[in-house]
Image (cartoon, rainbow, N blue to C red):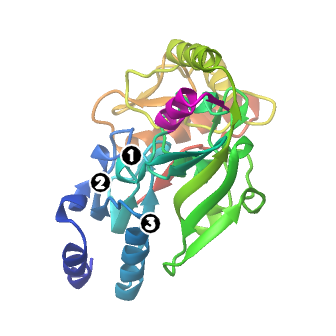
Amino acid sequence: MNKEFVRACYREFDAARLFADAPMRFHTTFRIGGPADLLFYPKTTEEVQRIIRMAREYGEKVTLLGNGSNLLVRDGGIRGLVIQFSYKMAAVVREGTDLIIGAGALLRDAAARAQEYGLSGLEFACGIPGSIGGAIFMNAGAYDDEMKSVVVSVKTVTRDGELHLYSAEDLDFGYRHSIFHGCDEAICETRLHLHEDDKALILARMEDLNQRRESKQPLSYPSAGSTFKRPPGYFAGTLIDQTGLKGLTVGGAQVSQKHAGFVINIGNATADDVQQLISIVQKRVYAAHGVQLFPELRIIGEA
C-alpha cells in the first residue's frame, strides 16, 4: 500500500477510526479473514466522498463492507482500502411513514425502530444479521419478503466521489441481487416506505419470526448466514441434508448439524477450510440430485 496515502488518511481523518493491517476476522460475522491493508469507519457521507477521492488520486483499490455478514474474506486479506459502514453512519430519521436510514444501521435496529414508530414492513428483517447498506446490496430477504418491497431510493457515492441518487426502479433488484453488484458504488443512505400498524401486532410478528429463526438456525456459532442460494424448485439445506452431509467437517468449518444450509466456524476455521467444504458440498449434491448449488455469501480478498 502507498505509504503517502496512509499518511494522508491519518492527516485527514480521526486516527481512532483508521486501522492498519486490520485482521478481518474481527470485522466479519464468520470470524474469518486475513488482514486489510487499511480499514476506515466513516461517520458522514462527506467523509466517504473525501476518502474515495483520495484513494483514486493515489491509485488505491477500495473495498466496501457493511456489517461483515454474508461474507467470506480469504486468508490473504484485502489489499488497499476497506471502507466499513458501521454504527457511526446509522441514523434513523422518520418522515411520515418513511424512514431515512444510514447505511451502517443494523437491520435488526432499523426494524426495532420501525416498530417503536408503529410502522410495519420491516418485520422480516428483524433477525437478519446485516446492515442496511449490505441488505440493499444483496436485496436481503427472509420469510417471503425482501428489501425490494420497502426501498424507495438509495443515495450513493460513486467511484469519482460524486453523489448519486437511485430510485427503486433503477436498482435492478432480483433474488439476492441489485445493480450494485455491477457498479460497485458506496451505499450511504436509503429511504424506506412502510405503513402504519398497531405496535403490539408488529412486535408479535417480530417475536414470532425471531423464535422461528432461533429454533432452526445455528446461531451459537459464527457464520456468514445462509451459505447457498436457493435453487429454483428446491431448498439448499434440504438437498444437503438428503445427501447426508450434515456434520461434514473440513478443518474448523462444518456443515451445521442444526441446519444444513449453513456452514459454520466451529473453531479457528480458515477461509480455505470453508471454500474446500463448499466445493465438496456442491459436488456431492450435484452427483446425488443433479442440482447445482451456488454460494450466497460473497467471497473476497487474496488467497
Instruction: Classify 10 Å Cα crowding around label 3: few (below 14), some (14-19), many (20 and above).
Output: many
Q: Compared to 183, does 8 lie above or below?
A: below
Q: How many marks?
A: 3
Q: Is residue 160 left or right of residue 270?
A: right
The secondary structure type at the circle numbered 1 is helix
Which mark, by number, is residue 271? 1
Q: Which contiguous range is marked in magenta?
A: 107-120
Give me the disc on residue 220.
none
Q: What residue is rendered at 20% in x and 73% in y?
A: 10
Dot 2 or dot 3, earlier in sequence:
2
Q: Secondary structure at mark 3?
A: helix
Side of 234 where 159 appears, left or right: left
Q: What amino acid type is highlighted by mark number 2?
A: Gly
Q: Amino acid at mark 1?
A: Ala
10 Å crowding of disc 2: few (<14), some (14-19), many (20+):
many
The residue drawn where x is 51% and y is 77% is 159
**Mark seen at residue 34:** 2
Mark 1 packing: few (<14 Cα in 10 Å), some, or many (20+)?
many
Q: Look at mark 3 in the image and give the residue it sits on.
A: 45
Of 233 and 68, nearer the camera is 68
